Amino acid sequence: MELPPYWQDLCDVGKLESAGWLFFGSLNSERATGGIEDGNPPFEVGVSQNDMDFLHVVNWERAAEVAQAGNTETYNGMPYITLDTAVAENLVHLVPEHKSPHGSDVTPDGKYVIVSGKLDPTVTGHAVADIVAAIESGAGETDDYGLRILPFEDVMFAQIEVGLRPLHTQFDGDGNAYTSLFLDNAVAKWTYGDDPSDSVLRRPRRRSTTWATSPRPRATPCRRTASTSSRSTSGRPTASTWWARCCHRTCSSSTSAARRCRSSTTWRWAWASRTTRRSSTPTGCRREVYPEIGWDPHTGAVDPNATLPGQERVERNGNNVEIWITAIRSHFTPENIDIRKGDQVVWHITNVERAYDATHGFALPGHNVNLSIEPGEPATVEFDANNSGVFNFYCTEFCSALHLEMMGHLLVR
């Protein structure tokens, strides 16, 4: 299905009372295009100007009927429903949600959708029955693409202040919700339902908590345990090499003060983990960064193509293009790069961070590029720009609360 050019995020499907509906958040309702190299606000600033972004509400059962009736178009062999058709058939509606959302989670009973805005300290509960009633009433204005924006007051059931930069929410079988808090380094436990609790218990986690999950995120979740994932391992065993790793916790939810029961670590950022085991990593390992920005671990010296802030550039010699960019929380410089089809590209990227766990990723779809770059580390890739189009490059390591905003565009003319 064709959608507006907002940045759509993670999805959750309805169940029981909300069966047949699909929910996912989006950011960049500003439709910012970056351009820090031209003096424009970087993406992390440009996409955070509006107070509200949009929760997308999709009637996927009706969409399936539209598709089966042949009311689609085809692109590269894939049938899709156009945005005009989605508007005409009432398939997609928008609900305002607090800026930079990062979670849309349906409660086990299917009655509520819980959303979190990374730049707002609250979680918002929307009653699905209220959303459906607002859709049927025809209330609300439209965005620039004709999608109806439901009035926030008509569909907002409750708001609960949980802490700084809430991300994802999961649930147990007793009406409790668990929301991960990135900046508070904690998980907030609260209750949902017809009379949601404004009493929030925060259980501290190791820093940069990014994910909370239950072993069975469905209509009959596990009553006793919930897991959390942390982007870094402050206070836990870390690698004796340059790598920073992720820490996962499994906690008991049977008491008001959930206790830690098991921990594990992984070499890479794990987006969602539902099984854990005890770590066999010895304690006392070092936490270090490279001695200098641009340090090549293979040569034990600074790479001659390492790029410092202010040295970013793009140079052309015929159809040979060489690019030097930097990565730092939470943007690349430059963000927009313009080349031509047939160019032979050499691309240097340097992570200029100095915090030991500030790893950045760099992915360039369509060109077989996917890097993990440690703090201070340089990297170089080469490819031929054989296909024209716009290719988004982005960070693939959860580096900060504005990780999703860390991206740029490669335009191949």
Image: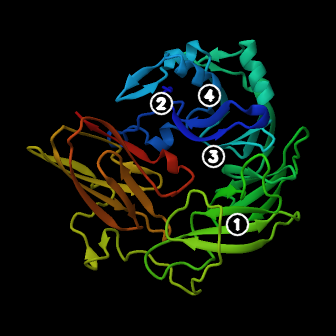
- Is any part of residue 175 visible from this angle? yes
Residue at (88, 46) in percent of width and height: 197
Identify the residue under disc 1. 205
Q: Nearer the viewer, residue 109 or 123?
A: 109
- Rendered location of residue 294, percent (x, y): 31, 68
The mark nearer the N terminus, 1 or 4, is 4
Residue extending farthest front: 68
* Amino acid carrying mark 4 in the image: Trp
Residue 264 lies left or right of residue 76; in this view the side is right
Name the colouring of the figure. Answer: rainbow
Q: Residues within 10 Å of mark 1 (few under 14, many from 20)?
A: many
Distance Cα–Cα, label 1 vs label 3: 18 Å
> Which of pointers 3 and 4 indicates the residue nearer the eye?
4
The mark nearer the N terminus, 1 or 3, is 3
Residue 342 lies left or right of residue 93; in this view the side is left
Residue at (69, 21) in percent of width and height: 150
Distance Cα–Cα, label 2 vs label 4: 25 Å
Identify the residue under disc 4. 60
- Rendered location of residue 405, percent (x, y): 49, 45
The mark nearer the N terminus, 3 or 4, is 4
Under circle 3, the secondary element is: loop
Under circle 4, the secondary element is: helix
**Whether residue 166 is situated above or below residue 12 in the rendered picture:** below
Identify the residue under disc 2. 31
Identify the residue under disc 3. 118
Under circle 1, the secondary element is: loop
* Amino acid carrying mark 3 in the image: Lys
Q: Residues within 10 Å of mark 3 (few under 14, many from 20)?
A: many
Distance Cα–Cα, label 2 vs label 1: 35 Å
Quadrant that contains the C terminus: top left
The reply to whether dot 2 and dot 3 touch (C-beta < 8 Å) is no
